Amino acid sequence: MRSSRTAVWYALILLFAINTLNFFDRQILGAIGEPIRKEFDLSDASLGLLGTAFTLLYAVIGIPFGRFSDKFSRKRILAIGVFVWSLVTAASGLARNFGQLFAMRLGVGVGEAACAPAATSMIGDLFPANWRARAMSIFMLGLPIGIALSYAISGAVAKAYGWRAAFLVAGLPGIIVAIAVLFIREPARGESESQQILSRRRPGSPYARILRSPTMLLIILSGIFHNFNMYAISSFLTPYLMRFHGADIAKANYISTFIFGVMCSLGLLIGGYVGDKTMKKWANGRMLVSAAAVLVAAPLFYGALELRPGELVPFALLMGAGCLLMYFYYVCVYPAIHDIVEPGLRGTAMAIYFMAFYLLGGSFGPYATGLLSDMFTRRAAAAAGVVEFTTASLEPFKAQGLQSAMFVIPCLIVLLAVTLYAASRTIEREMTALRTWMDEAADQ
């Protein structure tokens, strides 16, 4: 039985709320990282490693959650995941050292790993193919809004009450949302297509079938480049504004809120609309749109990083415009996975994609950027005549070091654009093959 319109939109709104909390909680370290770094006397690499802790388990645990999403109740998986990560986020405020905070972030990764495969699989069943990019854009609005709220609220709370209070505030709303999720009317798998499709299976391992797709392999590679960049930006944007441009923690987070809350939200809405409209003319339209958008983003990021200290308004506009275009990726590429993968394997396909997305992209982005920042900081200090590298002696050079490290981002964006263009050359053939198979299954 097809879900009613009210049930469909209730589910989508709840999934949006889950995604908002998802990114609020995972982004909190980007908002309050500087006071944590100073209290625990951390290097930038160690600060980045706290982000890596989350993504490592998030990526690995996502695979079994993806299979669970194809076999068991997705709303129950979501409810349990939201409850667990919210509880662990709140407990992170009790951490007394780097090791305890690292362990807490591992726990957050386990809980949040339930979200993406189950939620995106459910959206694929709630909406037909010609509406999925727009539905996905609403769901993915939780990404910039969650990050923006995390910057704004966590930064303000940290300034007024300290960074520990920010973790406690972040964890509370998840309990309410976890309960509300249980009232979703879960759609049948393949509901937006035909039920006969689910009774038919292609032979062979589901993992092998997914990874035999050239388009899927290119999309996975694109996810590695994209998530490296976005996690590097979100982890070090506020520290960069504080160090290089001299903003305090509240002002830096308000600028980050504008970039991710306003500009990136526009990117999702515009990208979803343009992606769906373009697909009506060309089967590979979404991939072409995302490739063109990220290619234009590269010089915008480069220009933002070339600005002088104190030029906050031009920085916010250039960085914001670049992030807006980068967010086309989510609403164009995620639906493309549904376009080439049969309904009964979409949760698994998303889990495989997200494993590479986070394990090889998101986990390396903050850590590698932190390592580069530390290296360039020491190089700048040595060039200035510093002989003994201590926390105090390196601190004046950390702004220059972080600036140099972040220039890796526009370079990788160019590689991302090339990868997306390559995927646009292969996707049409695979979409046709899937439609043919689904039509045959529906007729049986």
Image: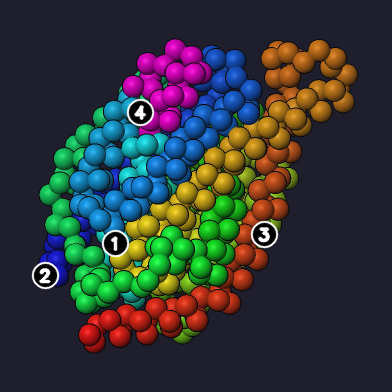
* SS state under label 4: helix
| Label 3 environment density (alpha carbons within 10 Å; few <14, some 14–19, many ≥20) | some
Q: In this rendering, is residue 386 above or below 435? A: above
Q: Could you tell me the amino acid type at mark 4? A: Thr
Mark 3 and mark 2: span between their CA atoms? 45 Å
Mark 4 and mark 3: span between their CA atoms? 35 Å
23 horizontally vs 299: left or right: left
316 horizontally vs 19: left or right: right
Q: Could you tell me the amino acid type at mark 1? A: Ile
Mark linked to residue 1? 2
Q: Which residue is mark 4?
A: 89
Q: Which residue is mark 3?
A: 415
* Residue 225: % across, % down: 60, 53
First to last magenta residue range: 91-108
Question: What residue is at 33 percent from the left and 37 percent from the top?
Answer: 111
Q: From the image, state whether disc 3 or disc 2 is nearer to you.
A: 2
* Residue 184: % across, % down: 16, 53
Q: Mark 1 or mark 2, which is nearer the start of the sequence? A: 2
Q: Is residue 107 magenta?
A: yes
